[in-house]
Image: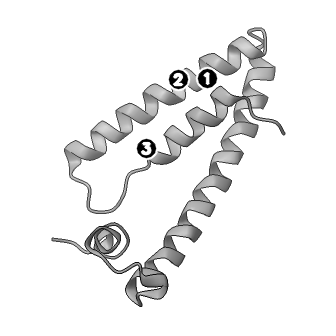
Amino acid sequence: MKLTLIEYSLLRLLLFLTPVPGLSPQGKKIIKNASKFYREILVSQILKTTNNSIYKAMERMGTVMKFLYVMEEAKCYTDQNFSVMTLFNIADVKGELPYEVHIRKGLKN
């Protein structure tokens, strides 16, 4: 499968707009609305590239969204590895920002 640059860019945005634990209800709503906005742009872009064929657009959207799942899994894997590196100061990554991003994110206030 070959993604267009626009599809890839929108998938990266959607990946970034995934709610995380500890987010306030207001924050979750903002993330949900932004995700919906960019998902609709992705759908309209796919409709354009498939000449408004609903069947082809649905098939393409399903294929593209499968790739989003792969990207999410890769993100989780990378995040877990970086958490271990930060926790044990492997590769001298100890510092406030890595700790906040990869260790404290799961802790509740």
Q: Looking at this rendering, what residue extends furthest in the top direction?
A: 51
Q: Quadrant of residue 78?
A: bottom right
Q: How is the image coloured?
A: one colour
Residue under the image location 28 percent in, 39 percent down: 29
Q: Would you say 16 lies left or right of 6 here?
A: left
Quickly name the residue at label 3: 17
C-alpha distance separating marks 1 and 3: 17 Å
Amino acid type assigned to the residue bearing label 1 in the image: Val
Residue under the image location 21 percent in, 72 percent down: 108
Residue under the image location 61 percent in, 62 percent down: 73
Q: Earlier in the sequence, mark 1 or mark 3?
A: 3
In contact (CB < 8 Å): disc 3 and disc 2: no
* SS for callout 1: helix
Q: Is residue 24 above or below residue 79?
A: above
Quickly name the residue at label 1: 43
* SS for callout 2: helix
Q: Quadrant of residue 63?
A: top right
* SS for callout 3: loop
For residue 40, the mark is 2
Q: Earlier in the sequence, mark 3 or mark 2?
A: 3
Q: Would you say 49 lies left or right of 34 here?
A: right
C-alpha distance separating marks 1 and 2: 5 Å
x and y percentages locating residue 76 in the rendered image: 54, 66
Amino acid type assigned to the residue bearing label 2 in the image: Glu
Q: Is residue 52 above or below residue 71?
A: above
> Could you tell me which quadrant the N terminus lies in?
top right
Q: Looking at this rendering, what residue extends furthest in the front direction?
A: 92
In contact (CB < 8 Å): disc 1 and disc 2: yes
Q: Quadrant of residue 36?
A: top left
